[in-house]
Amino acid sequence: MMLVAAGCGWAQADQMAVRKWVGANEKKILEEYSELIRIPNVTADLKNVRKNAEFIRAMFERRGVAARLLEVEGASPVVYGEIRTPGAKRTVIFYAHYDGQPVDPKEWLTPPFEPVMRTASVEDGGKVVDWRAAAKIEPEWRLFGRATSDDKAPIMAMAAALDAMKATGAKHRANVKFFFEGEEEAGSMNLEKFARQYKDLIQGDVWLICDGPVHQNRQQSLFFGVRGVTQVELTVFGPRRELHSGHYGNWAPNPAMQLSRLLATMTDGEGRVLVPGYYEGIVPMTESEKRAMRAVPDFDAELMAELGLARTEGSGEKLIERITYPSLNVRGLQSAGVGKEARNVVPAQATAAIDIRLVKGLDWRRQVDKLVSHIQSQGYFVTEKDPTEEERKKYAKIVRVRRGGGYNAVRTSMDLPVSRAVIAEMKRMHPDLVLIPTHGGSVPLWVFEEVLATPLIGVPIVNHDNNQHSYNENLRMANLWRGVETMAGLFAME
Amino acid sequence: MMLVAAGCGWAQADQMAVRKWVGANEKKILEEYSELIRIPNVTADLKNVRKNAEFIRAMFERRGVAARLLEVEGASPVVYGEIRTPGAKRTVIFYAHYDGQPVDPKEWLTPPFEPVMRTASVEDGGKVVDWRAAAKIEPEWRLFGRATSDDKAPIMAMAAALDAMKATGAKHRANVKFFFEGEEEAGSMNLEKFARQYKDLIQGDVWLICDGPVHQNRQQSLFFGVRGVTQVELTVFGPRRELHSGHYGNWAPNPAMQLSRLLATMTDGEGRVLVPGYYEGIVPMTESEKRAMRAVPDFDAELMAELGLARTEGSGEKLIERITYPSLNVRGLQSAGVGKEARNVVPAQATAAIDIRLVKGLDWRRQVDKLVSHIQSQGYFVTEKDPTEEERKKYAKIVRVRRGGGYNAVRTSMDLPVSRAVIAEMKRMHPDLVLIPTHGGSVPLWVFEEVLATPLIGVPIVNHDNNQHSYNENLRMANLWRGVETMAGLFAME
């Protein structure tokens, strides 16, 4: 039976028709998806990554999409596709990535590229089931395999959504473009090149970034930005070599203690960064964004219990508020040895690895400059290399600062017409839609904003408890089926 | 030719006679010493350690010493020997140890238990020479091999001194006892047992601890004490697992930053410990000790240049003064990863390894109590184990404190008659003798003071730049020859 969508836009009936079609075609979808998961896709495995690209290109071509591979020298290809819709007023570009994180098969319960279904997560005691033989596929079942969630799921959902639209007679109203990257898990190192080289081809009104998980309480969410990020490594130098702590301790300056003192000057212990100017230049949240933040379901208490925390930083501010500030996080410390490696020495050096997250309005290089100025104000000589003998003689306090790469935050206004259209469409499908002004994490989405000058909105579909980037990655079936509906709805958007 | 010592005590002539004998017998001494070095002596290598004991017992027996092995269950033996001198008014016990530090042969230029002579240290470009074929053994040459300096050198010097005394007709005036331990490099874990089990046998008026290096400027030194030591390991707990720093940074408390803040409260950044009561109970230096300290050659500027330090802690106090205080030294730091191991996480925990040195009057357990009280005063819940779920829920700041073993400092008064006698004897031989009230390092000499109630004085003979505990350990020939003289002089002491 074919259900025809009626009227302007995507109605309840269309969604129900797609849902019904999905219910009747679950095994067919899973069969094709299993084939896709079976192609290893670790970013560095260029040969197999390209096989994924070819496979996906063919998937979309079979469905009538003008699909091709975009190439940039030395990069894995982008799978690009187009659906032109006569009379369309808008072009919507769907982003996803088909490469995956590295795998250590020893850590996986079943091989990462041989998808299996379990009745639940491994942590919840899920048992392997033969979904092909099952009378019904339960919505809480999960398909295990690398990239089942991150980030082949949206690609499969889009392909199935095209089938569902065809079967139900639903129509496209906007132009649709597909842009599937193969290097995301290695930092999208060629994304800027692709954007510049194919700038004319990939013009559109909005990028929908189909990546990441939905809210922890399983409500569908949209996100409108991500934070920028950069890293800095600080190494404080003590004596030229490790010294016997009995003979020289508390006479020779101790770099581990110096580093501790230095780090302690950087925050107030409550998460507020004390580096002068750290919060200057932040683009304030709009009224819409503030409203959205207040409406985000409060999950802090559950998270604190799950993480074993009796308190959080920020004097009681919620997590969703905390990520609207730039952060300064000590991600690692090292000096001489601890535990079995501990020796009675004055260490020769001490290192802190720091990451800085940025919000809209801040420049990542400038933010590190502020930190360096602060370090200098604490009496340190700052160098980019190991100190020379001359420098050692001259300066009482020496720190080597190694700057890493980075990029800025992006945040699309929720008040743009295209934002409103996407929000409206999504709300129709998901009345409990959660609007997240910015994610705390970082993805190099600045390319879309800075190079292409196009707004972007994040449309995640997968479960948050999916073990992405780790072993036993999985996709919850209910998320896949709802994802197909979501993609069909967005494809049909005006 | 035999030179007979005349008069009471050891005169210039006796010393010259011994020096002459040594000059004529260098190769004979080195031949026997090479044989001793060839027996591997890593403390844990019990079978070979015992071979060393047997060899040394035989060395001293051949020289007319009543020598035997003292045994304690599960321990490597002590080589014990006696020379009874009719009419003696005093018994002097010579301590040394015949076991050595572990070796990693890959790091050694030549195998650690195949002694070779070089013309200088490796750092100064010393070349291997065939000393057996050489016309003259230069005083700056060095014999390389594990334990050549630490601590077989005094044992060889004592054996050669007995030969020299016999050859020159020098006489013992006091009773002499030898006590050579085989477990020092593993912490003398059975020394207390030996002392208690053989308490009656090893009575004497003074222990001469023949271990460690002479002053850095190569002047002969005596030391009258060592610092006590203990270790503590602090681990601050953050979230139950490492968290994504973008999603949770500056919301989830960061244990690396917390630990840094905590460490920063422990000292003033100038080496002064701020833990309340840390300096309470210290037995002050006597006038003799203060005078001795002022007379110790100032080596700080040279040391600072060698170590690449533009400043030291303690507001300009000299090293020799600094070691008269208890210290608090961060000997290691670790949290998540740095360098290539760095990940963008909020670490789950952060650890600092600390060692505490103690001076006379302080109790090592009590000193750690003071530190723990200080930590509690900073708002921490202190536990000895990983926190339970209940504790995680209850306490905002949690630190695990692991206490290591330890022992107290000892310091023999320079004003005791026996101290004065040893000082006088040594000054006769070494007019530029340096008197060091206490070493900065720690050796469990408390056993002699607390169990045996006998004063002790340290008589080091080897060069400070000997790579002891490291690879390419070596002994400077001039130190060995002067060591033989020194031992002969002490043997002849009244």
Image (cartoon, coloured by chain):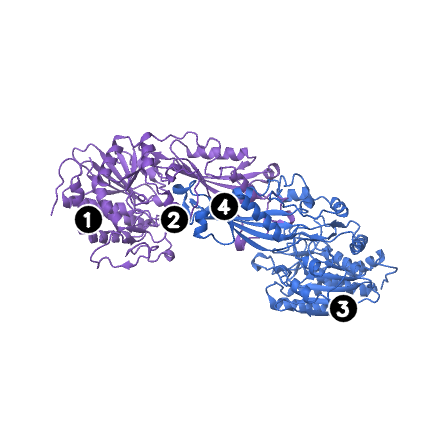
Chain colours: A blue, B purple
Q: Residues within 10 Å of mark 2 (few under 14, many from 20)?
A: few
Q: Which residue is mark 4?
A: B333
Q: Which residue is mark 1?
A: B22
Front residue of B122/B369: it is: B122
Q: Is residue B229 at all visible to an observer of this figure?
A: yes
* Dot placed on the residue nearer the N-terminal end, 2 or 1: 1
Q: Residues within 10 Å of mark 3 (few under 14, many from 20)?
A: some
- Quarter holding the C terminus of chain B? top left
State the image coordinates of residue A479 (x, y, percent, origin top left): 72, 55
* Dot placed on the residue nearer the N-terminal end, 4 or 2: 2
In-image side of A90 versus B199 (left or right): right
Q: Which residue is mark 3?
A: A63
How far is the residue under mark 2 from the one under mark 1?
34 Å
State the image coordinates of residue B226 (x, y, percent, origin top left): 35, 37
* Helix, strand or loop under label 4: strand
* Helix, strand or loop under label 1: helix
The chain that hosts pointer 3 is A
How far is the residue under mark 4 from the one under mark 1?
50 Å
> Residue at left 41%, top 32%?
B362
**Vertical position of residue B394 compared to residue A86: above or below:** above
Q: Which residue is mark 2?
A: B306
In-image side of A269 versus B453 (left or right): right
Closer to viewer: mark 3 or mark 1: 1
Residue A267, image quadrant: top right
Front residue of B366/A271: it is: A271
Q: Residues within 10 Å of mark 1 (few under 14, many from 20)?
A: many
